Amino acid sequence: MRIRRTALAAAGLGLALVLAACGQNAAAPSAPAQESAPPTGGAKVGVILPETESSARWEGFDKPLLEEAMRAEGLDADIQNALGDEQKFSTLADSMIASGVQVLVIASISSESGSAVAAKAKAQGIPTIDYDRLNLGGSSDYYVSFDNEKVGELQGQGLAQALDAKGTPNPAIIEIEGAPTDNNATLFYNGQQRVLGPKYQSGEYRLVQSQQIEDWDNQIGGTTFEQILTGNGGQVDGVVAANDGLAGAIITVLAKYGLNGQVPVTGQDATPAGLQAILRGDQFMTVYKPIVEEAEAAAKLAAALANGDTAAADAIATDSVQDPQGNREVKSVLLEPQLITRENVKTVVDEGAVPASDICVADTAAACQELGIATS
């Protein structure tokens, strides 16, 4: 689709201001950051989460679910967030190691910082678990995540499904990908290309540009998307957005030019903001990753390792992934992601991942009623 010239001329508001209001994937009001749970008296486990800016998931979902799962295993979990600061990530790890944690669970900002922390822990005889993100070249004993290439494959399938339904000939595609320092972003891209790569090569689809976004920064993602869009003469028929935060920023740009709801946009994380956008028709799909399963798997692994029972840990981590940088296989738990479109948004609510009240707001109430999503 092509930007209307009148819209281009009339777009007077600064994009940065619009993105500050709309593009950030902030946690829903009903899912605030949780206070740390009181000690259980069990084995002490340190958990470091990466940041709060690019996705609502870390504080709104992972933290409370990890607290609950660790308590259920009788563990005393100290869960902290590095707030996107590599030095803070390292400092938190040092503090946890000094405090005598028996296991360290890390969702790193980058492979470099994560690998450095894992090496420190290993030197002290503390087993580490890479949570959600594999640290390339690292030494963590185990890895818990979703099948991230499958996540990308679902994004590619979702976009293809939307474009097939629209019947647009030779659609122009823009890809806005995650951080180059995040191995997951590479895996998402690889999965997307299983579906989209052959279509680009055959000429069925036309790739305008694929761009990674430093630190998964939503504002940079929106600005980058607008630059690519206008550089292509305002033409775009589909957008690969690597997560719901980037999707929100892209939708803000599309709305600026009157194109929201006309151009299919992908996403990931099934956040309240992303699900609302799907119900409004501005975003075509997201990927639902039941974080409760990830948190529970990490807690079970941590409990086994705290007890020194590697056989029990190995019985939980029955998959493996290749770390090409470290030239090693990492014992893993790989969970199954799910494709979510308008038709099955209710699944996310029914499974308790997001309350209906978080997504059934004024401009989505009619869609919720139509889809049988009840807020009471």
Image (cartoon, helix red, strand yellow):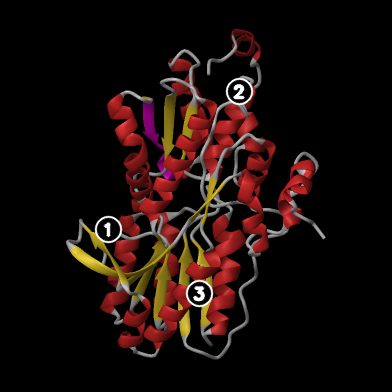
Q: Position of residue 194 (x, y in %)?
A: 32, 42
Quick check: is 211 in the magenta stretch? yes
**Closer-to-camera residue (256/155):** 155
Q: Is residue 71 above or below residue 292?
A: below
Whole-number angstrom distance, CA of label 3 to CA of label 2:
41 Å
Q: Secondary structure at mark 1?
A: loop
Tell whether label 2 touches label 1 (CB within 8 Å): no
Q: Secondary structure at mark 2?
A: loop
Q: Quadrant of residue 205?
A: top left
Q: For the residue marked with disc 3, what is the amino acid? A: Glu
In the image, taking residue 273 as reference, residue 236 lies left or right, namely: left
Magenta segment range?
207-215
- What predominant SS class does the magenta segment belong to? strand
In the image, taking residue 369 as reference, residue 37 lies left or right, namely: left
Q: Earlier in the sequence, mark 1 or mark 2?
A: 1
Residue holding disc 1: 136
Q: Is residue 77 above or below residue 8?
A: below
Residue positioned 60% across, 37% down in the render: 23
Q: Quadrant of residue 261?
A: top right
**Closer-to-camera residue (288/55):** 288
Q: Which mark is residue 296?
A: 3
Residue holding disc 2: 259
Q: For the residue marked with disc 2, what is the amino acid? A: Leu
Q: Earlier in the sequence, mark 3 or mark 2?
A: 2
Quick check: is 230 in the magenta stretch? no
- What residue occupies the far left of the structure in this picture? 327
Q: In front of the other: label 1 or label 2? A: 2
In the image, taking residue 354 as reference, residue 152 lies left or right, namely: left
